Image (cartoon, rainbow, N blue to C red):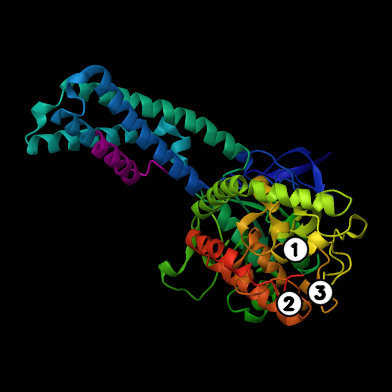
Amino acid sequence: MANVTTRDASSGQRSAPRSRIVNYKGIERRDWGNRPRLGDFRFSEKRSLISPAVVSGIIRLLEFLLVVVTGYAIFHFYVGPSNFPDNPGYVLYVGAIGIASLTTSLAFQLFNLYDLTAVASVGRQVARLGMAWASVFVLLVAAAFFMKVGAEFSRVWLAAWFGCGFAAIMAFRIATAFVIRNWARDGRLDRRAVIVGGGPAGESLIKALEASVESDIRICGVFDDRGDERVSRRVAGYPKLGKVDELLDFCRKTRIDMLIVSLPITAEKRLLTLLKKLWVLPVDIRLSAHSNSLRFRPRAYSYLGNVPCIDVYDKPIADWDHVAKWVFDKVIAVLALIALAPVMLLVAMAVKLDSPGPVLFRQNRYGFNNEIIGVFKFRSMYADKTDHNAGKLVSKGDPRVTRVGRVIRKTSLDELPQLFNVLTGELSLVGPRPHATHAKAANALYNDVVDGYFARHRVKPGITGWAQVNGWRGETDTPEKIQRRVEHDLYYAENWSVLFDLYILAKTPFVLLKTENAY
């Protein structure tokens, strides 16, 4: 532990020393930025960002259901069985509940009540909540009046729904605010950013971000290639953590959501050199435009609080896309395991009977963001000749491969246990194939053969992929083969959709019938 001086976020003044934890390169930093309201965390922390867009959408859905359930429950217990489905009045009540619930979602959106800042400060939003909720019922009553169906509705039901519904929404909002504030204190809702480039431009950018009250950016530090004589070890109160080459390793050891480049647009050569190194990372990359003399139309920029930026790269799969892919993977993987269980059992028995040794084999491979993962396969080699790092690729007639191994490798049945990797979250059903850590093409590591090879790791690897269904599976004995694989993988990452995944899955069984390149 060590004591260092910190900067107060609101006043910009230095506050009293407080204890820090040393975690990265000896830098005594526990609260990287100057936003103590979000709590302390460590350099080594890799907890994922909770997407505000997803949280807001879930709140919207739950409140919609809450309004529906409240209205229907009061109708059921007060209006009674005389208005059940065989009675036309039932349809009017159900229609009114559905319309009012949808109108509530729209009204809350118009009153900006789904913004997480509003959700977290529910006490200050009571008036707006009340106005939005009341406006829904005013519209409901007005619609009933002009449609001349007002007499069909129970006034007690309407009044009870108005009171109980508002009470239920308030209770839900209070509970949600408690959760949101806890997440905020843990930094789970903030995008953790690194400033690339120090000096006056970096310091000006940091001050502009600090002045943006509504910004969800937490600055973790600065990376700059220049030495301490040109860029001091602290920039606007934040530590200079290293050079740009070290940034790649840093982003793989901790959770970083965004890189903000402070270089001017006019520094074209420096920017191109920088982006060539950084684009392989699964993070958003923004080019700061707040201090540039060259100005475009406001719509040309995205904004971090009040700071204009130019979008350079986005995470390929984020927010609701990430949720959709996660659900897709888990549901299809479970169904596939159930359907293929007899096949997997037969393969396991054949492997066990063919040669001594374990049925399953676990091989180290590169996963998302270059993380090392252990991928399951049915063992296809003799137990004493297995290669956990794929230092030597399997070739035609390879003596290390067993009799059963040749069959299951050609048909890709050896890959079926990777469905368990999908359930654990290490793999996706569809994505770039996870290559072994020492895999080579023409006696050179893949990343030495293909420029920007690691960009394929910006998305989670998969059991099958766009490259495989286009014929690029099996042996990679030439640079051209791995080059074409990577090209297809990058295309997939930039064009992902659920329908694209379904198309690749549907095409995979037919591709497996072509076994000339699988050994």
Q: Are there few (<14), some (14-19), or many (20+) residues within 10 Å of tag 3?
A: few
- Which region shows up in magenta? 97-115
Residue 69, disc: none
Image location (x, y in percent) of residue 191: 59, 51
**What type is the residue that disc 2 sits on?**
Val
Which sits in the foreground, 427 or 334?
A: 334
Label 3 to label 2, Cα distance in Å?
Answer: 24 Å
Q: Quadrant of residue 264?
A: bottom right
Task: Give SS at disc 2.
Answer: loop
Left or right: residue 332 compared with residue 39: left
**What type is the residue that disc 1 sits on?**
Val
Task: Give SS at disc 3.
Answer: loop
Q: Which residue is mark 1?
A: 407
Q: In percent of the image, x 68 and y 47: which residue is there?
A: 420
Q: In percent of the image, x 53 and y 62: which residue is there?
A: 506
Which sits in the foreground, 374 or 307?
A: 374
Q: In percent of the image, x 37 and y 29: which residue is there?
A: 169
Say whether residue 237 is visible: no
Residue 396, disc: 3
Q: For marks 1 and 3, give the one nearer the viewer.
A: 1
Q: Are there few (<14), some (14-19), or many (20+) residues within 10 Å of tag 2?
A: some
Give the position of the N terminus as an image quadrant: top right
